[in-house]
Amino acid sequence: MTKFIEIPAAQAIISRRSKAFGVGINDAKYLTQPIVGGVACYCPYYTAWQSMMKRCYCEKTQKRQPTYIGCSVCPDWAVFSNFRAWMNSQDWNGKALDKDLLVSGNKVYGPEFCMFVSVGLNSLLTNAKAIRGDLPQGVSFEVKNKSNNKYYRARCNVNGKSKHIGYFSSVNQAEYAYLKFKSNLILEKSFSDEAVSIPKLQAALIRHSKEFNNKAELLKWN
């Protein structure tokens, strides 16, 4: 990959820039996506900013990933230079921008809610609603498995791979198994080197683990 180099942008180019997805202001004094030696180069700060704006304000993206419906970017970060300044102060290389590990259910991208974490931690709370349909998170209906009339499968994403938990005869049983597995998985991640090095992240993961466990216990007694 060609190393990104900041090439100053002419004022005429800057003045012609349109708002990113009708909202974001790219006020960079350099070319954020220049062609160098016939190869396209991408500013890592701009790439992260544009991706964030896309998740919040692109209808096509939200159609594919409905969990981003209702998300927004705080006014300060709608200006690229402000987001870049914050990102530059973070440990971001090779990591993903997360918005809801620190604050459960958060829908706003902003400095008080977000942080860069490993891809593995970022995917911990992924909600694949578009894939599973109306079934609970972690549960799928599989007619092909007819042994003992157990049609509901529980599974969980672990480090980018689908982990089979088991087959169950009811939705509730499958969901309970998923929630307990997820709770234990998150608790285990809370003691990873990455989490231990960031106290607020570790505390957030432990809280998420308890939330999943509480959901499981409520399901057990209802």
Image: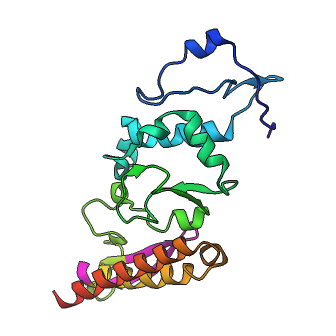
Q: Is 183 rendered above or below residue 99?
A: below
Q: Nearer the viewer, residue 158 or 198?
A: 198
Residue drawn at x 44%, y 66% is 125
Q: Which residues are magenta?
A: 154-172
Q: Is 108 rendered above or below residue 154?
A: above
Name the residue furthest right: 37
Whole-percent x and y of residue 179?
Answer: 36, 80
Looking at the picture, the colour scheme in use is: rainbow
Q: Is 88 rendered above or below residue 146?
A: above
- Image quadrant in which you'd find residue 115: bottom right
Q: Nearer the viewer, residue 129 or 70?
A: 70
Q: Is residue 160 left or right of residue 125?
A: right
- Image quadrant in which you'd find residue 1: top right
Q: Is residue 118 left or right of residue 134?
A: right
Residue drawn at x 70%, y 54% is 93
Asked if the stretch drawn in magenta spans residue 171, the answer is yes
Name the residue furthest left: 222
Q: Nearer the viewer, residue 212 or 103?
A: 103
Whole-percent x and y of residue 138?
Answer: 37, 72
Whole-percent x and y of residue 191?
Answer: 59, 83
Residue drawn at x 46%, y 85% is 184
> Which quarter of the rendering shows the C terminus?
bottom left
Whole-percent x and y of residue 64?
Answer: 39, 45
Q: Is residue 25 left or right of residue 143?
A: right
